[in-house]
Structure formats: C-alpha cells, structure tokens
Image (tube, rainbow, N blue to C red):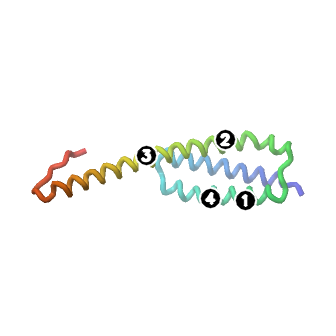
Amino acid sequence: MNNAPQLINVYQQLLDLSHGMLRLAADGEWDDLIIKEVDYVSAVQTLARSTEASPPSNYLQEQLRPVLRHILDNESEVRRLLQARMDELSQLIGQSTMQKSVMSAYGKQGNVYLPQN
C-alpha cells in the first residue's frame, strides 16, 4: 500500500501546526499555545501510526527531510520561548515570596511601605 500522500499530508499538517505554535509562543498567547499543542500531539500520533505499519521509502524520506527539519527548528524555538517564559514566571514567584516574607516580618510593626513598580 502506498501511504506517501497520507504521510505528506500529515507532515504538512505538523508543519502548519508548528508554525502556529511558534507564532502563539512569540506573541505570548500561552493558553492558545496549549490548545494548539493538543492538536500537534494528535498529529504526531497519527504520523507514528502511519509509519508503524508501512515505513516510508528512502525516496519519500528524502522528500520529507526538509519539512521535518523545519518542524524541528520550530519546536526548538517554541521550547526556547517557553523556557524564557518559565524563567520570567520563576522570577515573579521569587519576588512575590520575598514580598510576603517582608510583609510577614514587618507587618506586625505597623504600616510597611513597599516601593511601587
């Protein structure tokens, strides 16, 4: 059975989804990114099922290699953006924890004035 058209369609779907995920991550649309990621994982599972029964020919693999490289590059950039966001959130949590500690330590002594952002 020739599954080349199906594989090409799934790879194209993955590429489109990865572009969308990259755009959402770059725009800071984290909730929408998570929703898009569910579709992406589903497409990856479809790809795995498609290639499990009938691995692609060497010729088809060569055709799909640039598409796969682009998908992987997009994934890498999304991962980098997610890490930057996690670092930012970690810093905010640290600041909040420090502020709570200050409030707890000095709150019993009366009014505490904190600098405004």
Category of crowding for the residue at label 3, using alpha-carbon neighbours closer than 10 angstroms: few (below 14), some (14–19), many (at least 20): few
Mark number displayed over residue 46: 1
Q: Identify the residue shown where x is 63% and y is 41%.
A: 73
Quarter of the figure that contains the C terminus: top left
Quarter of the figure that contains the N terminus: bottom right
The kind of secondary structure element at disc 3 is: helix
Quarter location, residue 103? bottom left
Mark positioned earlier in the residue sequence (1 or 2)? 1
- Report, in whole angstroms, how far the alpha carbon at label 2 lies from the one at label 3: 26 Å
Is 39 on the left or on the right of 81, as rendered?
right
The kind of secondary structure element at disc 4 is: helix
Mark number displayed over residue 16: none
- Report, in whole angstroms, how far the alpha carbon at label 1 lies from the one at label 3: 33 Å
In the displayed orientation, state which residue is furthest to the right.
1
Which residue has dot 4 on it? 39
> Residue 44 in the image: x percent, y percent?
69, 56
Mark number displayed over residue 70: 2
Q: Amino acid at mark 2?
A: His
- Report, in whole angstroms, how far the alpha carbon at label 1 lies from the one at label 2: 19 Å
Q: Amino acid at mark 1?
A: Thr
Q: Identify the residue shown where x is 19% and y is 48%.
A: 114
- Report, in whole angstroms, how far the alpha carbon at label 4 lies from the one at label 3: 26 Å
Q: Amino acid at mark 3?
A: Asp
Count the numbered circles shown.
4
- Front disc: 1 or 3: 3
- Report, in whole angstroms, how far the alpha carbon at label 1 lies from the one at label 4: 11 Å
- Front disc: 2 or 3: 3
Is 84 on the left or on the right of 108, as rendered?
right
In the displayed orientation, state which residue is furthest to the front.
105
Mark positioned earlier in the residue sequence (1 or 4)? 4
Mark positioned earlier in the residue sequence (2 or 3)? 2
Mark number displayed over residue 87: 3
